[in-house]
Image: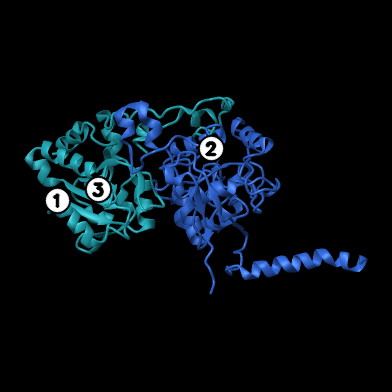
Amino acid sequence: MRFWSRLMPAAAVCVLTAAAGAAPRTAVAPPGMSRVGPGIYRPLYPASAAEKEVPVKAFWLDERLVTNRDYLTFVGKSPAWRRDQVKRLLADEGYLAHWESAKALGSEARPSSPVTRVSWFAAKAYCAERGARLPTEREWELAALAGETVADGSGDPRWVGRILAFYGEPARRGALGDVGRAKPNFWGIYDMHGLVWEWISDFGASLVASDSREKGDAERNRFCGASGADAQNPSDYAAFMRVAYRSSLEAPYTTARLGFRCARDVEAAR
Amino acid sequence: MTYRYLILLFALAATIGCTRHASQPAPRAHATVALPLPVPTADPLVLGQAAAARSAPSLYELPIPLVDEHGVARTLDSFRGRPLLISMFYGSCAAACPLITSDLKRIEQKLPASARAAVRIAMVSFDPARDTPAVLAQLKRERGVDSARWTFASASDDAARDLAGLLGIRYRRLDNGAYFHSSAIVLLDAEGRPQARLDGLGNDVTPIVSALTLRN
């Protein structure tokens, strides 16, 4: 009896492995990425009643934010993205401004800190060079919903409070902390909250006309294609802040607290 | 970046230290703060900024691939040489997208003949799967626009994202196949530099008309 009970954990692992094997097989995890989802994303501003619960397919997501070191390697291979060669069209004047030079990080940009002061175009090019892409808003939000032990941490006031504390924190001077220091979330992803804001592929398209009704025709008319619904869970201030922040961005912008990570599709293998 | 003054800027974003001046300590955001409302659409053209517009980077630096209503593959910079009014849309949009066309036609009608003859107009779809060249050609006929001046085109998903990024147009595809998007008409000069823009639909087109008239 004692023998069998000792074997039980191993047996349980075998059962789990077998169950995983029965699911549609997926490619091996790309280096540094973890599988996130599938899951349900509840947009703060659903574009229609049908969009209140959005199924999100499983995808690969970088466990860690792209670091200065990673990005330095990238600009070494792709000189068009060096700060002295980048097209102004694709990145504003602040692009990598905290680096010591076009080819060196210096004291303001520690190698293991997330790279910031990169534009959406630059982030997109970095991911494309790796055969990856930026996560979509729904993918990012699904990953960000997870607490340390649950896929949906939104019911945990302590977890939500920590996220809010980060958003409320005044921008710190000096270098950012290292990536991957805090505990990973349920999916194995680090730093979804607490270090920097992140670029997504479809930033800024979350505001719906319904919320603009009192603002007159000009504002209402900026967006079309949505019948509109009221904000879901308006107590989710962190989601409000992200929507507001992303809406204020333009693709060539760079800021000291905006970084990124890459994602990939999970393709079903035969 | 010369039309930064146009950007839908949220006061909240500024208060939480995430603006371009993030090195300055920002006041603590309060959990009780209501989502500030976007600033109403600004005056689409400040003539005093014309000089700055002339030095704006050209969109033609990025060879964005398009396919036009004739099925011809071309890049955005194939419009070089004449002023261009450009907007993005999707063809199966029943409500607002026809209004973009009608705004563009209103601009056309208000132009002096010489300016009207000079300008080109491009409507670029971010729905390449449905907006095939045949569909685009059909749309162009239905809208009754001048065939020589107008181009209906589509862009691949990736190219459309880039173009939308350059034009400051936001969109996302909904699960029902529709798109949720902002509407804007951007005026590029002959070298592809943004000169003026109109955000939203059904607005006063005078600023664009003035900018096009002044150029002639």
Q: Chain of mark 2?
A: A
Question: Are dots 3 and 2 in contact, CB under 8 Å?
Answer: no
Alpha carbon separation for disc pair 1 and 2: 44 Å
Residue shown at the point (53%, 37%) measured from the top left: A239
At label 3, the amino acid type is Glu
Q: How many marks?
A: 3
Badge 2 is on which residue?
A239
Q: Chain of mark 3?
A: B
User: Is residue A134 depicted above or below A197 in this figure?
Assistant: below
Mark 2 surroundings within 10 Å by alpha-carbon count, few (fewer than 14), some (14 through 19), many (20 or more):
some
Quadrant of res A33: bottom right
Q: Which chain is drawn using blue?
A: A
At label 2, the amino acid type is Ala
Secondary structure category for the residue under label 2: helix
Q: Residue furthest right?
A: A2
Residue B163, horizontal then vertical, whole percent: 34, 50
Badge 3 is on which residue?
B191
At label 1, the amino acid type is Arg
Q: Which chain is drawn using cyan?
A: B
Examine the rendering and report whether any part of residue A252 can be seen. no
For discs 1 and 2, the disc positioned in front in the rendered view: 2
Residue shown at the point (52%, 32%) measured from the top left: A234
Question: Are dots 3 and 1 in contact, CB under 8 Å?
Answer: no
Q: Which mark is residue B149?
A: 1
Residue B68, horizontal then vertical, whole percent: 23, 59
In the displayed structure image, the side of residue A58 where residue A177 appears, left or right: right
Residue B59, horizontal then vertical, whole percent: 31, 49
